[in-house]
Amino acid sequence: MIEKEFRNEDPPVKIILLMLLVASLLGGGALAVKVGLQGFPPLKMAFFRSILGVIAVGGIGLYYGMSMRLRFEELPRLLFIAALYTLHTITLNFGTDFTTASRSTIFFTLYPVFTVLFGHFWLPGDRLSVRKVIGIFAAFFGVVVALAPNLQDGSVTKYFIGDVIVILAACFLGLRVTLTKVFVQDIYPYRFLVWLLGLNIPIFLVLSYFFEREQPIKWTLASGAALLYQGWIITGFCFLMLTWTLRTYKASKLVVLSFLMPISGVLFSYLFLGDELTFSVLIGTGLVASGIYLVNMRR
């Protein structure tokens, strides 16, 4: 039986540690996308990633005996969430084309800020506080410090359009996370995620047909492994854990952990691509950790 009471609890230490693991794995998603694009056009890659995600989440749900049958009253909400998923994916890819990767990472990392703002108005018991605001912006400043050396061209006007589109993508994702918190009170997380991904499969297929018809797939071991990481680790495990924890715990205290993503992305690049690990990354990591602690600190 699904609980009808709106659950919005403070996450305990074990949930915080779980979400830190999730954020770290999500940080490797940037590397997986970079490698995957060597063999797959972006929309085709999103199409296959969604299929792999449905297989992973649906398989786990069926293993535990959960019904995946969609109820008619759930369809409007799922369609709206699926539209937000598509919008944030397209605007992020499109905006990144008009700016640098580091600037895109920094501005997209604003999505926890939008989640907290939306949650202040829509989520009972998840209001803004001075400590929470300070913690969120300390974590965001840590991301800026960590990635600042990669901002080779400081021109604002040159990348203004791309930066604004990426911020819009962050806004779409923040709204999606907030509404996911609301919707999963009445929809099991497994069924919610299966149908969210499933509804996006035909969307990405149609968009790929029109915009990537002349771009073939080049299967390689590296691109295939990157696709599996995106489909089963990112979409299957990480998205499922985030959706499951959002059902019970405060969105503002969960999404602030996402500021660890770009930090772990830099570390993944250091380990697997040999990128330089700078002093600014260490300082930025400390600021991110401080911000996470402030937001989740108990009175």
Image (cartoon, rainbow, N blue to C red):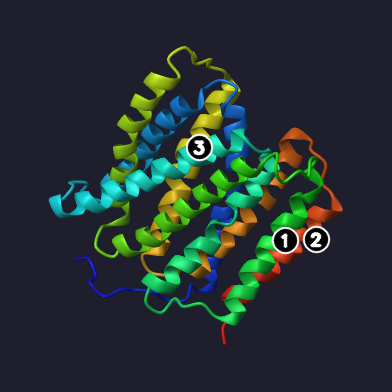
Which residue is the site of mark 3? Answer: 230
Work out which quarter of the rendered image holds the N terminus and state it: bottom left
Q: Earlier in the sequence, mark 1 or mark 2?
A: 1
Can the viewer see residue 196? yes
The residue most toward the right is 279
Q: Which mark is residue 20?
A: none
Mark 3: which secondary structure? helix
Mark 2: which secondary structure? helix
Rounded to the nearest whole Å, what is the CA distance between mark 1 and mark 3?
A: 26 Å
Q: Could you say where residue 172 lies in the image, as x and y percent from the top left?
A: 45, 51
Q: Could you say where residue 205 lies in the image, as x and y percent from the top left?
A: 35, 26
Q: Residue at x 56, y 28 (%)?
A: 36
Vertical relation: 294 (above or below) 72: below
Q: Quadrant of residue 212?
A: top left
Rounded to the nearest whole Å, what is the CA distance between mark 2 and mark 3?
A: 29 Å
Work out which quarter of the rendered image holds the C terminus and state it: bottom right
Q: Earlier in the sequence, mark 2 or mark 3?
A: 3
| Discs 1/3, front | 1
Mark 1 surroundings: few (<14), some (14-19) or many (≥20) residues within 10 A: many
Q: Which mark is residue 142?
A: 1
Mark 2 surroundings: few (<14), some (14-19) or many (≥20) residues within 10 A: some
Q: Earlier in the sequence, mark 1 or mark 3?
A: 1
The residue most toward the bottom is 299
The amino acid beneath tag 1 is Gly
Mark 3 surroundings: few (<14), some (14-19) or many (≥20) residues within 10 A: many
In the image, 16: left or right of 67? right
Which residue is the site of mark 2? Answer: 283
